[in-house]
Structure formats: structure tokens, C-alpha cells
Image (spheres, rainbow, N blue to C red):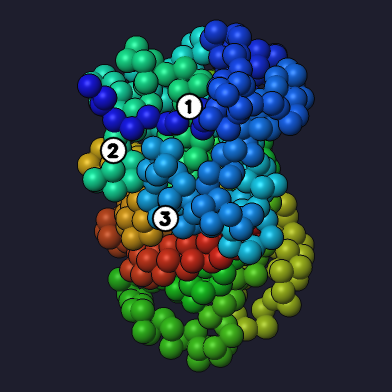
Amino acid sequence: MQQGSFVSPLLSGVCCECRSEEHEGSHPGGVRTTSMHPGGHGGEPCPAAHTCETCGGAEQEHRLKVLFQILDVNGDGGICVNDLTIGLKKLGVHRTEHELKKIVKAGDKDLDGQLDFEEFVHYLRDHEKKLRLVFKSLDKKNDGHIDSQEIMQSLRDLGVHISEQQAEKILKRIRRGHIWAPIMYMDKNGTMTIDWSEWRDYHLLHPADNIPEIILYWKHSTIFDVGESLMVPDEFTAEEKDTGMWWRHLVAGGGAGAVSRTCTAPLDRLKVLMQVHASRCNTMCITGGFSQMIREGGVRSLWRGNGINVLKIAPESAIKFMAYEQIKRIIGSNQERLGILERLVAGSLAGAIAQSSIYPMEVLKTRLALGRTGQYTGIAGCFKHILQKEGLGAFYKGYVPNMLGIIPYAGIDLAVYETLKNSWLQRFATDSADPGVFVLLACGTMSSTCGQLASYPLALVRTRMQAQAASLDGGPQMTMSGLFRHIVRTEGATGLYRGLAPNFMKVIPAVSISYVVYENLKATLGVQSR
């Protein structure tokens, strides 16, 4: 009894199965036979129009042409979404309209809404390369087959834990398309393993690659900017690294951070003022703080210190990413992706290196935010003033609590985000790992908030230490432990959370703005959304 709709033999032979070094393991049998096609005369094999550049095989070009003719339902020389819907059904391949639109969009170079033969061939060959990268990343044993243990390991590397029974279900059958469509079986021979040909045949005319979707859709630190840069960097798929998409993601993330920080700068400056000046004797509310800033320096003063806050995004992101990749190689050995604990260690070390490199800019930001109108002529003026009056050491005031704050912030942020992500994937990820905008924003907001809450006392002490010379005019400098004791003694434990209200008020708008800008910049830079 037939258990589902299998990919047509015509489609399964579209791409070459040669045994060259580049394609090693693509076809266990090693020998390709010439297939019969009704288009031939009297049941004879169809002649080949071209030979394979890699192995000299004699069918590939002809198969592509025949497949194109089948999918080009109206015979106008182009394949549109409607053609794909009808043509793929003839081949027993069922895809949703959304998935078909993705296929056309991915291959449509001249933006005419359909794929001509050249675009169609380019899409299939390009997509096969991507599928090969994914297959190799899943094939941990490098034996040309994927089994349930390898599926479990790959998902475990991403923080998703499933049972062996669930992994076998993934191997056995994956339902795609409408609920009334036939079930597509990836493991066609029932061996509970998938070889390259089965993997390719199943996914060739599908716009997304299941496991890497988790990395693609659940980027966190690249997308969300809440003003603090202590998150563990995002993972990038092998495909993103090979195609150079990773730097476009970083540029889009940097641009989104710049816009987000600029939009929430008034709340950020108010937070700094409350951290340094608010006390039991000098209570400062949100409306009172804004009124005071506007009275002192006008509306423009609300953005004081924002320039340096935006400028430090680029060097910090670049240094952190490079450091993270180098540390990953050291920690992870030959693993492509690290586990959660290893990611935390690598991310925290990369964050420490990046923060150490740009820390003088943090001090400048605090001094500028606390400065009075006319006190400094700008960033350069502030730098010169501190250097002349206090020396180079002043640019590293508060460095120790800042470094100590990386671990609780990054650890809790990562743990909460991974927990929420894992929970959503287990409960709701039936057809796609794409969580949608609102789930992504909610998870990012919640994890960032928890991370900030855990590290906030250290952040407050850091800010006060950075501001000491400005407020005490060269008086005795307090140490980190001395400041902690002084705050608890004079203001109580709540004194360690001064400025928390404006800090939390800016999280939701910061996350929302950075996400919207990130998506728009991504489109501008040509990063394909899956």
C-alpha cells in the first residue's frame, strides 16, 4: 500500500549525482543509469543536450529542460506561482502558496514575477549547493547518511532537546503544505536514515532548510539593541558565512542599533542622571528629570551623549564578532556550532575583549550625558579635558564592575531566550521554525529585561565610578566595594536600582524600533528573508 506522495523520478534526477571529489557521497551506488522518458521515441533513452561539467554525465541539461516544460503550464517561457502550483502537483510535490512565492522571489533576478529557463536553472543549482552545506552540517559522522542521533545532536547544539522518537518521526515523514495534501516521505526506503539523494529530492523545490531555519529566524543580539552590548553574539549558518551574508546582517544590526539608540536617547540620559544624582534626599521622578534637562539645556540636551553612544556600535560589534569566531574555534574544536554553555563562555570572553577595546568611549558617553551646557565643546573636547585633568587612567574608571556585569547579563539573557525559544519550538513549530514578529519581540524583550535586572547594580556602580571625578572635583575616589557599601548604607538596597524605571521604559520601544529598522536595512542590503 502506498504511504504517501513521493517526489517524481524526473525531479529526483534533476541534479547530477557524480562521484567526483566535490560531490563525494552524493550517490551511494556510484553509477548513474540513463533513465527512460516518454519523450523518447519508442521507449528509447532521451538524448542529452549537454554533459555535466563535473563528471561528463549525459542527462542533466535535458532533465532540466523537460522539468521546465512540465512546470511551464501555459507554455509562455516563464514559470509563475500558478504554474508551479499546477506543475508540482503533476509531479506529486505539494507546497503552500507562500512557499511557492518564496521560490519565485528567490530566483526572479529580473523582477518580472516569473522564472525563465536561465533563472530556473540558476535557482535549482544554487539551492542544491545550500542543501549540500546543510546536509554536511547534519552528517556528524561524515558517512553520507543522517540518522536520528545526528538530528538530535544538531538540535541539541541549537538548544533544542527532542526525544529519539521525535527525531525518528522527523526522519520518517514530514508533512508539508495543506493538511489535505499527501504526506511527503523523506526517508523513502524505510531505513531510518537519510542519504544525500533522499535529502535533496525532498528539499529541492522547497524554499527553506528546516534545521538552519532555527538559526536564521531566531537571531537575537544582532536584531535587538537595548543600549547595552553585553549579549552573546548570534550564530550564523554555514550558508550565511559562505555567501558573505553575515556581514550584511551585522551592518543591518548596527544601523538598527543607531536608530534605536537615537530614538530612546532621552530615556537613556535620564537613567544616567538618576543613577548618579538621585538619592533619598534628592528624589528625581521621570517627569521632573525631563523638565530639569529641558530647563538646563533645551530640548537638544535630551540627546546629550548620544553621538558617542552611536559611534561605538561599529567597533564594538566588529571586535566582538571577530573575537567570538576565534574563541569558538579554540573552544569548539571541529564543531560547527557550540553548545549553550560553550556559547556563554565564548560570548562572555568576546564581550570582555570588545568592552576593553572601546571602554574609554563608555566613560566619554557618561561624562557627556552628565555634563552641563557649555561644559564640553563636543566629544573631542571632553576627551581632551579628561586627559589633561585626570590622565589616561580616568578612561577606565568603573572597568571592573563593567566586566563583572557581563556574566550575569549575558548568562541570564541567553538562558531565558533559549528557554523561551526551546519552549516555542517544541509546542508550536510544526511546519516552520519562524516564530513571527510578535513572538520574537516578546522573547527578546523578556530575556533582555531579565539580563538587565540581574546586572543592574553593577551597571549603576560602574556609572557612578565613571562620573566620580566630575561630581567630586578631584576628591577621594571610591572603590567598587566602597561604593556598594556606601549606597546600601545611605540609600538601602533600592539605591542599587536607581534609574531602573526609565531603563525598562526604553526596552520595548528600543526592541521594536531596532527590529523594524533591521528588517528594512536587511532588504536594502539584499539579505534574503526565508
**Mark 3 / mark 2, whichever is N-terminal:** 3
Q: Distance between the Cα atoms at labels 3 and 2?
A: 18 Å
Residue that numbered label 3 is attached to: 98
Q: Residue 368 carries which label?
A: none
Residue that numbered label 1 is attached to: 9
Where is residue 341 shown, x and y percent of the image? Answer: 41, 28
Where is residue 369 shown, x and y percent of the image? Answer: 56, 71
Q: In this view, does 481 lie above or below 25?
A: below
Which residue is depicted at the point 33% across and 60% down? Answer: 438
The picture quadrant where one finds residue 487 is: bottom left
What amino acid type should be assigned to the residue bearing mark 1?
Pro
Q: Which mark is residue 182?
A: 2
User: Horizontal placement of 450 versus 410: left or right?
Assistant: left
What amino acid type should be assigned to the residue bearing mark 2?
Pro
Say what secondary structure mark 2 lies in: loop
Where is residue 3 shown, x and y percent of the image? Answer: 25, 26
* Res 246 visible: no
